[in-house]
Image: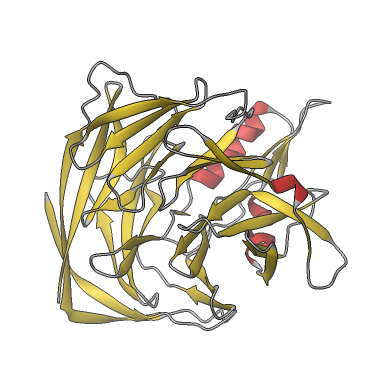
Amino acid sequence: MTKYVYLLLAIAFISCSSEKKSEAENNDDFKFSYAVDTVMVDAGEHFFFLNEDLELADVSPDRKLLYNLNPKTFLLEIVDLDNLKLEKTVQLEKEGPDGIGLPYYGKIQVLENGNICLFGQFKIHIVTEQGKLVKTIELDQIKIKNNDQKEEEKIGWNSVLSDDGKLLASTLVNFDYKTPAKGIVVIELETDSIKYIPMNLFQELKQFEIIHQEGNAPGIISGESTYLSFIGDKLIVSSSAYNDVYRYNTSSDSLSHYSFKASLTDNEKIRNFPNEVHSSKEWTDAEKAKNEQVSFQEFLKLPEQNIFWRVSTDKDRMIADSVVFKQVATFFDADFKMLNEQELENFHSSRKPFFKDGMLYSFINIEDEMAFIRLKPILEE
């Protein structure tokens, strides 16, 4: 299936913390189309761990291998993406000198040297592809004081390493978990040098948290996603709630904020739900109200075209009591000028899509087999 549309060009560069919205104008010289296909991964006699929809998976920086972790057995599945087949499995150790056993892992990341980082709540274990423990980063031992020196914060759940493993970036949380952190940190792991970057994003996201508290049971908190990724010496920060992005230049120690104006989706979530609920029904209703609104995915770099790509999901229409969602792809140039937005048909973006060979790979489970929907954008000037 191929779609065709004239691109829009928008001026979206805003330095530092400027909130000015971009304005779009037609650019008939720039055209976009795409093709979609589906490919299966040959597992041989193996059964892939797909229960978490590749939530604990990552691709190597050269996009040749995909690593998928089974958090129950600590079996690491390594997929050859060039030939779309299982290459091998590696059994990681839970105990002992190479032990990486933790009660919970939030994500994994593959570095350019082939080492695999396993992100837990309080630790990051770094292992070789053969399962040898290289290093453990104790996150709960890193304490941060912001610029006013009045509030102490600590490394949050959401962290990322640079491809060379030298920099660690993380969101922050307050020790009381009640007030939002005021920024992020970038840490040089070899020198323990810490850069504190003030940012309003997390205070703005606080309004979308829902606390589920029943009796004396431990409370459950849900909130919006925050995305962090290193692209070269730039740290890219965005969220699922707002149509904007922050870019921190680690070389020049400068922060830029780019804000966009969409025509095919809303530009931000609104709080049309309570922040605190006390029953399962109230929790379900509040989550439903929030999830029917726009949601932005992470910015991805399309290296072959030197542009960024992002998929957004928003409510399209109702059929009886069911919500029909639409998915919209938006392109940005290397300076975050908005180039185009286009609704996608016959395509569903998974939670962790990735680009390979100019195509966007999105995981899909087909009868308990690993498969990918591939979308190939065709850009013409």
State which quadrant residue 46 falls in.
top left
Image check: 229 left or right of 122? Answer: left
Q: Nearer the viewer, residue 333 or 28?
A: 333
Image check: 234 left or right of 89? Answer: right
Can residue 321 be seen in this snapshot? no
Q: Nearer the viewer, residue 162 or 248?
A: 162
Instruction: Find residue 96 and report its horizontal and vertical position in percent.
Output: 62, 24
Q: Nearer the viewer, residue 171 or 240?
A: 171
Q: Residue at horizontal 36%, vertical 68%?
A: 263
Question: Is residue 381 positioned above or below 167 on the image?
Answer: below
Q: Residue at horizontal 18%, vertical 36%?
A: 39
The colour scheme of the drawn protein is secondary structure
Residue that sits furthest to the top in the current view: 45
Can residue 72 be seen in this snapshot? yes
Q: How many marks?
A: 0
Q: Residue at horizontal 34%, vertical 79%?
A: 10
Question: Is residue 288 positioned above or below 189 on the image?
Answer: above
Residue that sits furthest to the left in the current view: 1
